[in-house]
Amino acid sequence: MSKTAQGILVLFLVLSLLVAGLLAGVINSDHWRIQRLDVEAPFKRVSAEQIRRVLAASPERSFFRLDVNALRLRLQNLDWVQRVSVVKKWPDTIQIRLLEHEPVAIWNGDHLLNQSGQIFAVADVEALDALPRLYGRDVTAPQVWDQYRRFNNLLQATGTEIQTAHVSDRGAWEMALRNGLRIRAGSQRLDARLARLADSWDSLMRLGFGLPEYVDLRYPNGFASKWAGNPGSSRPPTETPANKMQQAAGKRTGFNHHNDEQRHNQRQYG
């Protein structure tokens, strides 16, 4: 190696050591401290005080030494946080962008669903008792939430909405509306079945028997309705709704469910 090349190499090494030393001094210096915090968040469920406490839990204030990934993980662990980003902005600012979960339903009794059908947990689910309650397998949560919204739109003619819904492993829906009506919808052609009920709702109410106890939509060309008997009695009244329906429609009444014929307070619609 020529003397010129050796000299260049030595100069390069010296400069590298100087730069490394300078950087080490800058990084370890207390002069480059975080002075400003820029937070963008809805502040509906997560408060500014909660964010401040997370930041205060870390004694590190150096712009260079602060671990933004660790800070992001601590913020992500707060209740109601759906997504958060933490970045440094030269020369002295930490920028936090936080998105909260928007609760739309209680899931399986002890978790919540957000607006995307994502499952999340918070400390006090029961405080949100006014939300609809949905039950099903966790892997189906986004699909169940999408169906719930669609079915509510189809049931607008009833003047109410779904309060509780159980979805079986094979996708069969059993639901209760806020007015107390229970619906067995099955797992096939759900939109068409609920649309049939909605289209028939005014005719069903004009029969004059009040709100049915439940309706069963698991029929190819119609549905079945059952009315409750006298309050406080398991026996139907003498002048049963079924009798009235026979007189009005001239049609035999009955409700077939699991091959058991129930002849009181019931009628199958075609």
Image (tube, rainbow, N blue to C red):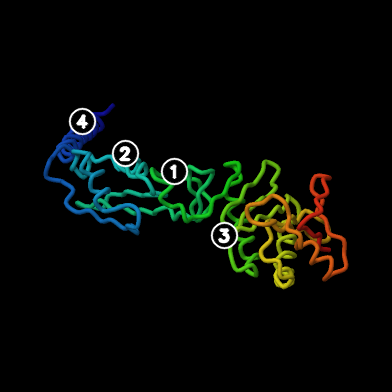
Question: Cα distance, mark 4 to mark 2?
Answer: 40 Å
Position of 22 with respect to 173 (left or right) is left
**Can you tell which of label 3 and label 2 is closer to the viewer?**
3
Question: Cα distance, mark 1 to mark 4?
Answer: 60 Å
Which residue is tagged 2? Answer: 70
**Three-letter code, disc 4:** Val
**Three-letter code, disc 1:** Ala
**Three-letter code, disc 2:** Ala
**Can you tell which of label 1 and label 2 is closer to the viewer?**
1
Counting residues from the start of the chain, the first of labels 4 and 3 encountered is: 4
Answer with the quarter of the image where residue 219 lies: bottom right
Question: Cα distance, mark 3 to mark 2?
Answer: 45 Å
Tell which of 211 and 170 is nearer to you: 211
Q: Residue at x 72, y 73 (%)?
A: 206
Counting residues from the start of the chain, the first of labels 3 and 2 encountered is: 2
Q: Residue at x 65, y 70 (%)?
A: 157
Which labelled disc corresponds to residue 121?
Answer: 1
Q: Residue at x 70, y 47 (%)?
A: 172
